[in-house]
C-alpha cells in the first residue's frame, strides 16, 4: 500500500510539473518508472549532484527493484549493491511492484558478507547529500531491524510518517530472522511513542496517529483512539473502520477487538445514527454486532423506541398473514426470526423494560404484526375484563373496546384466517369464546350504564351464564367451577351484581307503571311480570350464595331482592 501510494505520488507530481513545463530538459538513459523517479528527484532536490543515489532510493521507496537496478546500473554499474538489487529484481520479474500479493516473495539472503560495516568503513561521519541517500540504500538492502524504529525519523531521507512506517516494515521483513516478532515489536513501539509524538499538540488530528497504528496492525488501539479523540465524527469514522476490518476478517478472530466493534456500533447507533437516520439505516449497523444476543437485544430496542413497526416488520394481509416483502428486518432474518423479534419487542413495550414507560398499545400492534394471536387475544381479553365496569377510564376504555371490535371483525368474520389457524394449532380456541363473552358483557354494561335495561337482559340471556330454574343451579355452579376462565371468574361477581341490578331496575319501573293504572288487563300483565322478575331475583340470589361470592356482593343482592315487593 505504502509503495503504491508513493508511486502514485511521484507519477502525479511529475505529470503536473510536465503539464506546467517545470521539468526542463533532463539528459537520461533511464526508462519507464526509473525515468519518472529521476525526474521527481530533479524536481525535489533541484540538483544533479544527488540524483544518482536519490533515484535508487526512491525506486526502493516505491517497492520497485527493477527500476532501482536500472537506476544503479546507470549511476554505478560496478557498485557492490548492484548484485543484491539484481537478485531482488529477478524475483520481482515483470511485476511493477515487488510486494505484489501474487509474487509472495521471501527474504533474499544473498547479501552474504556485505553489511552496513562495509558502508561505514568507506565513509566518515561527514556525509554529503548523495552519501545520505546511498546510506539509506545500504540500510534498506543489507541493514537489520533496529531496536527503536523512532530513530529512523532522524534520517534525512525519512520525511513523512509513511516513510517511517515503510522503513520499519521493510526492516521487519528483510532485516530480521523472525519477521512476525519484528512486526509485533514495531506495533508496540508505535503505541509506546503515543499520539503526541505523531499529532503534536493538535489533539483533533487523530489520523496522524491512527494511520501508523493501522499500518502496524494495532487495530483495536487505532479505533479506540479515533472514537475518543474526534467527537461524533470520530465515532462515525471508527465505526466504519471497524466494520471494514471485520469484513476483511482482521477483527473476526480477536474477541477483544470484536468487543471494540460491538461497543462502537452500540455507541454509534445510540448517539449518532438515530439523530438523523431512519430505523432501517440504524438496523444496517445493528445487524453487524458480533454478539448474537446483544445484536438481538439492540434490534428489539430499536423496534420499540423507533415505533417504525411497518418499516421494520412489514404489514398484515386481509387474512392476517404478515407480509415482509418490503420490511427491512426480512432482508437480514428469516420470517420466523422476524416474528420472534417482534414478539420480544411487544414484551419489552408491555413490561416497560430498562426504564421505558409501559406501552400496551404498542405491544398490541407488535403482537398483531408478529402473528402472535394467542398472546394478542390474551391481552385483549385482559383489557376487556379490566375496563368492563370501569367507566371512569374514558379514552382508554374506548380504545380497547374499538381495538377488540376491529380485531373481531378482521379475524372472526366467517372466513378461515391466520388467527384461527394459530389458535387451533396452539389448542387455544377457548380464548375466542372468552373474547366473545367479554365483548357481549361489555355491551351489557354499556347498556346498563345508559339505563337501557330492556335491551341489556337479552344479552345476558344469550350467554347462558345463569340458571333459569332451581333445577339448573347445581349444574351452573359446577360449570362455573370447572369451565370458566380465570378472567371470567374474576369479573363474575360484578356480572351477577349487574344482572341483579337490571332485574331490580326493571321491577321498580314496572311497579311504577302499576300506579294509577285502571286497566284490569294491563294490571294483570304487570303483576305477572313482577312475579317473574321477583323469581328471577330470588334465583340469582340463590345462585350467588351457591357460588360463594364475596359477602358484600351477596349482601347487596339480598338487599335488592328484599325491596322487590
Image (spheres, rainbow, N blue to C red):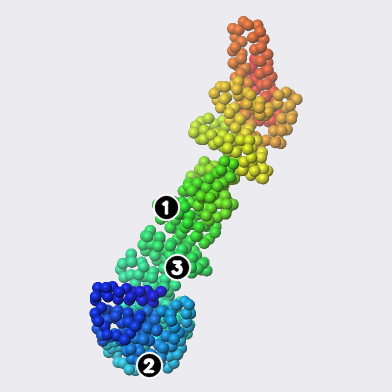
Q: Point out residue 417 in the picture as x, y percentages from the top left corner.
A: 62, 41
73 is higher (above) or lower (below) than 552: below
Q: Residue furthest right?
A: 471
Left or right: 197, with 485 as reference point? left
- Residue 277 bears which disc, if any? 1
Residue shown at 52% from the left, 52% from the top: 329
Q: Quick one: label 3, few (<14), some, or many (20+) residues within 10 Å?
A: many
Q: Quick one: label 2, few (<14), some, or many (20+) residues within 10 Å?
A: some
- Where on the picture, by quarter, is residue 230? bottom left
* Of residues 392 and 315, the one drawn nearer to the viewer in this rendering: 315
**N-term mark: 1 or 2:** 2
Q: Which residue is mark 2?
A: 80
Residue shown at 47% from the left, 52% from the top: 280
**N-term mark: 2 or 3:** 2
- Residue 73 seen in the current view: yes
Left or right: 64, with 378 as reference point? left
Q: Point out residue 356 in the picture as x, y percentages from the top left corner.
A: 48, 47
Mark 1 → mark 2, Cα distance in angstroms: 63 Å
373 is higher (above) or lower (below) than 273: above
* Of residues 130 and 259, the one drawn nearer to the viewer in this rendering: 130
- Work out which quarter of the rendered image holds the N terminus and state it: bottom left
- Residue 501 bears which disc, if any? none
Label 3 SS = helix
Q: Which residue is mark 3?
A: 220
Residue shown at 49% from the left, 48% from the top: 311
Label 1 SS = loop
Left or right: 32, with 382 as reference point? left
556 is higher (above) or lower (below) than 220: above
Amino acid at each position: 500500500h505504502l509503495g503504491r501510494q508513493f508511486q502514485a505520488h511521484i507519477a502525479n507530481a511529475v505529470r503536473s510539473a510536465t503539464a506546467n513545463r517545470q521539468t526542463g530538459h533532463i539528459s537520461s538513459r533511464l526508462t519507464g518508472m526509473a525515468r519518472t523517479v529521476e525526474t521527481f528527484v530533479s524536481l525535489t532536490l533541484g540538483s544533479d549532484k544527488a540524483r544518482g543515489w536519490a533515484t535508487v532510493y526512491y525506486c526502493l521507496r516505491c517497492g520497485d527493484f527493477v527500476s532501482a537496478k536500472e537506476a544503479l546500473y546507470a549511476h554505478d554499474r560496478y557498485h557492490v549493491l548492484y548484485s543484491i538489487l539484481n537478485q531482488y529484481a529477478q524475483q520481482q520479474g515483470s511485476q511493477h511492484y515487488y510486494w505484489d500479493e501474487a509474487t509472495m516473495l521471501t527474504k533474499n539472503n544473498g547479501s552474504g558478507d556485505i553489511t552496513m560495516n562495509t558502508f561505514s568503513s568507506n565513509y566518515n561521519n561527514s556525509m554529503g547529500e548523495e552519501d545520505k541517500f546511498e546510506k539509506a540504500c545500504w540500510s534498506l538492502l543489507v541493514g537489520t531491524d533496529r531496536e527503536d524504529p523512532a530513530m529512523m525519523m532522524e534520517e534525512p531521507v525519512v520525511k513523512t510518517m509513511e516513510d517511517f512506517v515503510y522503513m520499519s516494515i521493510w526492516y521487519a521483513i528483510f532485516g530480521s530472522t523472525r519477521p512476525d516478532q519484528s512486526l509485533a515489536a514495531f506495533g508496540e513501539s508505535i503505541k509506546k511513542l503515543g499520539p503526541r509524538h505523531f499529532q503534536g499538540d493538535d489533539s483533533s488530528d487523530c489520523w496522524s496517529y491512527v494511520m501508523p497504528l493501522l499500518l502496524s496492525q494495532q487495530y483495536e488501539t487505532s479505533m479506540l483512539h479515533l472514537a475518543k479523540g474526534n467527537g461524533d465524527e470520530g465515532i462515525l469514522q471508527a465505526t466504519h473502520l471497524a466494520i471494514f476490518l471485520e469484513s476483511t476478517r482482521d477483527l473476526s478472530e480477536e474477541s477483544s477487538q470484536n468487543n471494540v466493534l460491538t461497543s462502537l456500533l452500540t455507541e454509534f447507533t445510540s448517539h449518532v445514527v438515530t439523530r438523523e437516520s431512519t430505523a432501517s439505516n440504524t438496523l444496517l449497523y445493528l445487524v453487524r454486532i458480533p454478539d448474537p444476543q446483544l445484536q438481538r437485544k439492540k434490534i428489539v430496542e430499536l423496534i420499540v423506541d423507533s415505533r417504525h413497526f411497518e418499516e421494520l416488520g412489514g404489514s398484515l394481509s386481509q387474512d392476517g398473514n404478515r407480509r415482509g416483502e418490503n420490511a427491512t428486518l426480512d432482508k437480514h432474518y428469516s420470517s420466523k426470526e422476524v416474528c420472534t423479534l417482534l414478539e420480544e419487542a411487544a414484551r419489552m413495550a408491555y413490561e416497560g423494560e430498562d426504564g421505558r414507560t409501559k406501552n400496551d398499545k404498542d405491544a398490541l400492534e407488535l403482537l398483531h404484526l408478529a402473528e402472535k394471536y394467542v398472546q394478542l387475544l390474551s391481552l385483549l381479553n385482559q383489557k376487556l375484563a379490566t375496563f368492563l365496569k370501569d367507566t371512569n377510564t374514558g379514552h382508554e376504555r374506548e380504545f380497547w373496546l374499538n381495538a377488540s371490535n376491529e380485531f373481531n371483525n378482521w379475524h372472526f368474520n366467517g372466513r378461515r384466517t391466520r388467527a384461527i389457524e394459530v389458535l387451533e394449532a396452539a389448542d387455544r380456541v377457548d380464548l375466542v369464546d372468552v373474547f366473545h363473552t367479554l365483548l357481549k358483557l361489555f355491551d351489557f354494561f354499556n347498556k346498563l350504564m345508559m339505563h337501557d335495561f330492556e335491551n341489556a337482559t337479552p344479552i345476558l340471556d344469550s350467554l347462558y351464564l345463569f340458571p333459569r330454574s332451581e333445577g339448573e343451579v347445581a349444574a351452573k355452579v359446577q360449570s362455573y367451577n370447572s369451565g370458566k376462565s380465570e378472567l371470567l371468574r374474576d369479573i363474575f361477581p360484578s356480572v351477577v351484581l349487574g344482572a341483579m341490578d337490571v332485574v331490580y331496575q326493571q321491577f321498580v319501573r314496572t311497579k311504577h307503571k302499576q300506579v294509577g293504572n285502571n286497566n284490569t288487563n294491563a294490571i294483570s300483565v304487570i303483576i305477572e311480570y313482577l312475579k317473574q322478575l321477583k323469581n328471577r331475583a330470588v334465583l340469582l340470589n340463590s345462585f350467588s350464595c351457591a357460588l360463594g361470592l364475596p359477602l358484600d356482593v351477596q349482601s347487596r343482592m339480598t338487599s335488592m331482592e328484599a325491596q322487590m315487593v
